[in-house]
Image (cartoon, helix red, strand yellow):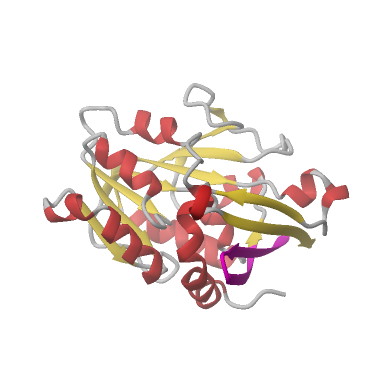
Amino acid sequence: MAPDSSDRNREVYRRLARYYDAYVSDFVQDLPIYLDSVSQDTVNRVLEIGCGTGRVLQALLNAGSLATGVDISEDMLEIARHKLRAFLDRGQLSLQNHNFIDSPLPEQFERVFVTFYTFNYLLTTSEAKRFLQNLNHSMSERAVLIMDLFFPAALANPQTAGEWNKRSLGRGENTVWLSDRRTMDGRVEKREQVFEKNSLRSEIVTYRRFYSRAEIIAMLKEAGFHKIMVANAYDKKAFQEMDASEEPKTGFMIKACQ
């Protein structure tokens, strides 16, 4: 079984940080949902949890949001600071090394985004419940939470579990080769990745837990959230009232009110 989530993930992302931009740079499908959520005139303060090197933050900042990004990886945050220096200098952005398992932030936010499967790195329900409770304390009245959650590939297509897949990231001299395989241990996915660039080779193992819709509903309600809605795809018009009895084999996004 996987070790403690927080300590393990800090070490993993220390090594992954150098490849992370190549890994996520082409992923933009989620951005319209976040941008639509902050387009209202009443939205001023936005929080992204699991901001990594700043992919989503950059889109929010370009749209004029006053944003705070948090991550447990100082290495990721250092890259984000370099990329988003202009926004930091003019006070539009704050970056913090913070873990919501441990405590809330003293500030309160009108929009909170838990992006790109960040929640799935919480491997126990006790961690997940503390995370949501602390997050709720950092939200203003009538604030909105949006979370992006995954469905493991090894569950969606069991015949592919344990198979290695190789693909290239980036182009030209910036090309990174990624070999990847996924296996399941109960509800936890073990993801093995090998990144190769020129003479550098890094082997990285991460663990992510699949949370069903029923689990998410129960934990959100226990943490004080209501008006829980779900979208099966990255479609800002697709959010519907959540039905715990439905468990399609796809990733999904959750929207909930404080």
Q: Which residues are magenta?
A: 188-207
For image coordinates 88% across by 48% down, the residue present is 159
Q: In the image, is 169 to the left or to the right of 1?
A: left
Rendered location of residue 122, percent (x, y): 56, 63
Rendered location of residue 160, percent (x, y): 83, 50
For image coordinates 39% across by 56% down, the residue present is 53
Of residues 173 and 35, the one nearer the viewer is 173
124 relative to 147, above or below = below
Q: Specify whether residue 20 is in view.
A: yes
Rendered location of residue 47, percent (x, y): 32, 50
Of residues 202 and 150, the one nearer the viewer is 202
**Which quadrant holds the N terminus?**
bottom right
Q: Specify whether residue 222 is in view.
A: no
Rendered location of residue 206, percent (x, y): 62, 66
Q: In the picture, residue 163 is in which quadrant?
A: bottom right
Of residues 185 and 205, the one nearer the viewer is 205
Residue 201: in magenta span: yes
> How many numbered markers are drawn?
0
Q: Is the stretch drawn in magenta largely helix, strand or loop?
A: strand
Residue 88: in magenta span: no
For image coordinates 17% across by 51% down, the residue present is 86
Q: In the image, is 18 to the left or to the right of 77?
A: right
253 relative to 53, above or below = above
